Image (cartoon, rainbow, N blue to C red):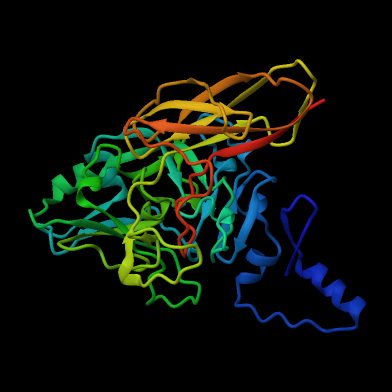
Amino acid sequence: MKHTNPTGRRKFITKTGLSSLAALLGAEIVFALPEGYLPLVLENDPQTLFGKHPELIVRNNLPWNVETPAHLLDDRVTPNEKMFIRNNGLAPEKIDVAGWTLTIRGEAVNQEKTYTLQDLKSKFTKYQYQLVLECGGNGRADFFPPTEGNQWEVGAVSCAEWAGVRLKDILSDVGIKSTAVYVGYHAADLHLSRDTNKEVISRGVPIAKALENETLIAYEMNGKDIPPAHGHPLRLIASGFPASVSGKWLTGLSIRDRIHDGEKMAPPSYALPCDPVQPGSDVPNENMCIIENMPVKSLITYPKSGAIIKENSPLRIRGHAWTAEQRITKVEYSIDFGATWSTCQLENAKNRYCWQHFQASVSFPRKGYYEVWVKATDDSGKTQPMLTPGWNPKGYANNACHRIAVKVS
């Protein structure tokens, strides 16, 4: 049971609070949730449970899906307390780090092999990269007609520093066959039904993506062990693809001689119509294609939307831009709804798949209400549309220009 406060952030009513409410109403409440659920659902919020910033927005609490407001993504490297959470099931209830293993198997491996955490840390070179992870449904709230799923606005994205073993080095150690096509992951998260025979999510990436330098089996985030909410102790990181392929609580990899057929690999999950469709259309699954590269995108992180400034005062804006291609080449801003554009200062990325920071000094011609829009362009020539693009049944891949409201008084 929950309510929404005026800021839109969900609060959770405690068991004690529910009992008091029942007494006032002269009613009796029977708590029939499975043992262990009540504290998780009713007595904790993301701040208490995961150490998250109190302004994060709960989109779903069973499973936990929590969004970061745009202004809280101003850090160059996203800290744990400001990182969004996207879960499909329940986090593992017990994590035995000492006994944790990663098993590599499948039709296209030369041998099945199992590694302990210590094996991964001691036998392979450690690499670290700043890598964007973005939910495939980020921006879903803007589609019309509306689509089902967590109604993410713009904050289901992060760029932390991940460290671990390159997946390509593990695959080289195991040995893969020339028939290898896909790498699928397996994890320790628990199905919402608590049926241990049901896999929550088992997605993956084409072999070419698996062999990129930046695709990691990570065991650290921002210089520390990965936090429990983000996949401790092992997580696959495949930046540039929807974050659903970056499996948390990793226990195994299947090297396939075909497209992986794990849970949530088949359409309509994480798939777009192969050809453009009319908004609101029913699209047969056979006409859907798996999402691979995420679209070019940018985000204003300062100031917060609704800023008020004095007339004749310039406004400093800043934010990030990212792409699944090599790099962002240009970020522009507009204060006249896209009629004209001016160029932002743009920094180089620390590494591929890291977001790039931009800033600009914006001047306004006179008093009144304005919107500041930004759009990014990458080295492949792809740029952001001003309006929500490509309606699709699941509300994926919205990369419309981000904008903030500004009042000049």
Given residues 298 and 1, the one toward you in this image is 298
Q: With respect to residue 70, does 183 lie above or below? A: below
Instruction: Pick whichever, 330 or 212, lies toward us.
Output: 330
Q: Is residue 379 above or below residue 220?
A: above
Specify whether 349 is left or right of 127: right
Q: Position of residue 198 (x, y in %)?
A: 39, 75
Count of marks placed on residues? 0
Q: Which residue is at 12% across, 59% downward?
A: 108
User: Left or right: 198 with respect to 158?
Assistant: left
Give the residue drawn at x 14%, y 62%: 257
Q: Position of residue 81 (x, y in %)?
A: 59, 42
Check the image and name the residue furthest to the front. 339
What residue do we see at 35% from left, 55% from top?
A: 291
Residue nearest the observer in this picture, 79 or 375: 375
Residue 129's x, y, as percent?
37, 33
Placement of the N terminus among the 4 image quadrants:
bottom right
Above or below, comparing residue 57 to residue 402 in the picture? below
